[in-house]
Amino acid sequence: MKNRCSTSIALDKRQVRQSFANAAQGYDAIATLQRQVGRELISRLSLPHEALVLDVGCGTGFFTQQLRDRALLKNIIGLDIAMPMLEKTRQRLIDAPVSLLCADVEQLPLANSSIDALVSNLALQWCSNLDVLFAGVQRALRTNGLFAFSTFGESALCELKSAWAEVDDYPHVNDFFSLLEIKQRMTAAGFVDVRLERQVYQVKYTSVIELMRELKGIGAHNVSQGRNKQLTSKGHLQSLLAAYPVTADGKITASYEVIYVLAKSGQRQ
């Protein structure tokens, strides 16, 4: 378990890239929560139509398309760590192509003060180090540029994490940063007018197996460096199923804490 005062999480970035590359083909069919959160984030944005906007973790392009069609933005760059995801974005927006960039946001390949806004929908939770992430965003944004994103909070998938804790001591569920950690590190990085809002979405599944298949299908399965790299045994799986609470209707509930963040880049030193 990570230190609650830390600014980094041990993630296997190679595995992150591979997981999302593998998920590209079937992602849109199951990413219901991601679309819901994306629409909510879009509703909070207010940007000039000509603003140059970087969409980080653009995935298959749903959120990118929303930026174009609902926020009416004309100059969008889509960035993703997985090339197959970018190919899906290209196919989705073939009628009005956007610039695409295959890169890791923690090694942001943009010039200083080069963009008006950086937006991201449920992608920054796959970043390892908040200080590195926020320093890079602050550097790339123009003064008073908008930084708007949604991310999973520390209690996301708490039921699954608790159930696995009854089985063994390996990390089976990714750790996520808390609202307080995010706010403190953004302020330290020089962001101003930092506004955060927490919302918990509860999603029902017919079984734990369905939940785990969905997480794998959207590329969100365990990518912790300390994960057990062996296949889960039948006995461990049965123990997990027995430990996960079941509702009166025989289903299970998974809680997703989502943090919405809006901030502006501060004055350059």
Image (spheres, rainbow, N blue to C red):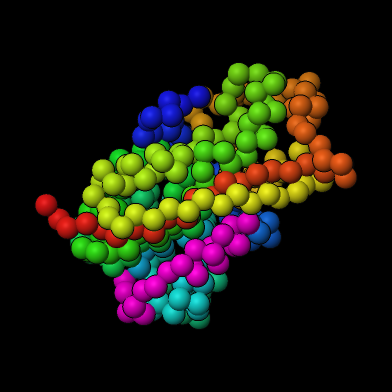
Using the image, determine if residue 7 lies above or below residue 166.
Answer: below
Q: Residue at x 23, y 50 (%)?
A: 190
- Is residue 164 rendered magenta in the image? no
Using the image, determine if residue 253 lies above or below residue 222.
Answer: below
Q: Residue at x 39, y 55 (%)?
A: 195
Residue 8's spot in the image, x, y percent?
38, 33
Q: Is residue 33 left or right of residue 106?
A: right
Q: Is residue 54 left or right of residue 40?
A: left
Question: What are the residue bounds of the magenta stretch?
Answer: 33-52
Residue 2's spot in the image, x, y percent?
46, 26
Residue 203's spot in the image, x, y percent?
71, 50
Q: Residue at x 44, y 80 (%)?
A: 72
Q: Residue at x 51, y 43 (%)?
A: 153
Front residue of this view, candidates 226 and 41: 41
Front residue of this view, candidates 219 and 160: 160
| Residue 56 found in image quarter | bottom left
Residue 204's spot in the image, x, y percent?
75, 49
Q: Is residue 253 left or right of residue 191?
A: right
Using the image, determine if residue 188 lies above or below residue 3.
Answer: below
Using the image, determine if residue 2 lies above or below residue 79.
Answer: above
